[in-house]
Image (cartoon, rainbow, N blue to C red):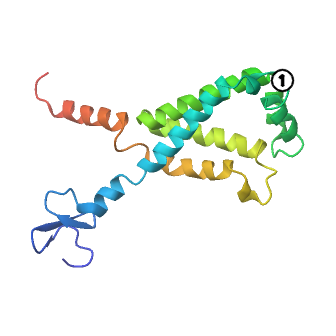
């Protein structure tokens, strides 16, 4: 196969698909399959982590209490002086219990959407925004910056925002269903 020729055949009953060589009938071979599923581990990790974080916040009585050790109010008090966006911290401090419930609900929605692959880009955008807000408030004072965990989460959402959930997802199943319906002559 000539360099740059992605349609030519490769000897021995193999073919090239999208630059990946593999046996005929293998959908492009092992490398192509790995490329198609490359975001799946990231999806499972981020979706599971956000789902767990949201459930943990809702079931932890200390987190939703108005004050005291382990409460969101205590975390916000500590972050207020060093946050990049102190106005966001002040807004959350006006109603920490309601803000905590909203944060937990958002994390659960993002986690479920990411795991199921339902509205994958929207779920990734939600995860990115939650991570951005946490980085600009709670994690901002981490020094050096890479000790804070919210910045890596923020960056991990970017590939899912760009690519969506193209495999093993409800989004992919709905897209396939729409394509099949488009090909039907009757019904």
- Above or below, 132 against 27 in this view is above
Residue 67 falls in image quadrant: top right
Q: Is residue 88 left or right of residue 128?
A: right
- Seen at 51% across and 39% down, the residue is 47
Residue 157: x and y in percent read 55, 47
Residue 61: x and y in percent read 72, 22
Q: How many marks?
A: 1
Q: Quadrant of the C terminus?
A: top left
Q: Out of 107 and 171, give the one closest to the viewer.
A: 107
Local crowd at mark 1 within 10 Å, few (<14), some, or many (≥20)? few
- Seen at 85% across and 27% down, the residue is 68
Q: Out of 3 and 62, give the one closest to the viewer.
A: 62
Q: Quadrant of the N terminus?
A: bottom left
- Above or below, 134 against 158 in this view is above
- Seen at 57% across and 34% down, the residue is 52
- Above or below, 156 against 168 in this view is below
- Seen at 82% across and 34% down, the residue is 76
Q: Out of 57 and 102, give the one closest to the viewer.
A: 57
Residue 117 falls in image quadrant: top left
Query: Of helix, strand and loop, which one carries label 1?
Result: loop
Residue at the far bottom in the pictured view:
2
Q: Which residue is mark 1?
A: 94
Residue 64 falls in image quadrant: top right
Q: Is residue 2 left or right of residue 118?
A: left
Residue 66: x and y in percent read 82, 21
């Amino acid at each position: 196969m000539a360099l740059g020729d992605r349609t030519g055949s490769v000897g021995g009953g193999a073919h090239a698909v999208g630059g990946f060589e593999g046996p005929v009938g293998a959908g492009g071979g092992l490398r192509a399959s790995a490329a198609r599923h490359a975001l799946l581990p990231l999806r499972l990790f981020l979706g599971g982590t956000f789902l767990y974080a949201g459930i943990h916040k809702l079931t932890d009585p200390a987190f939703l209490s108005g004050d005291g050790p382990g409460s969101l109010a205590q975390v916000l008090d500590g972050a207020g002086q060093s946050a990049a966006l102190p106005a966001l911290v002040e807004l959350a401090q006006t109603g920490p219990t309601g803000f905590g419930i909203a944060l937990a609900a958002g994390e659960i929605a993002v986690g479920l959407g990411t795991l199921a692959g339902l509205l994958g880009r929207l779920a990734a955008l939600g995860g990115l925004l939650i991570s951005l807000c946490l980085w600009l408030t709670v994690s901002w004072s981490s020094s050096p910056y890479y000790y804070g965990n919210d910045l890596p989460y923020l960056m991990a959402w970017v590939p899912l925002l760009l690519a969506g959930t193209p495999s093993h997802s409800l989004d992919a199943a709905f897209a396939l269903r729409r394509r099949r319906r488009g090909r039907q002559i009757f019904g």
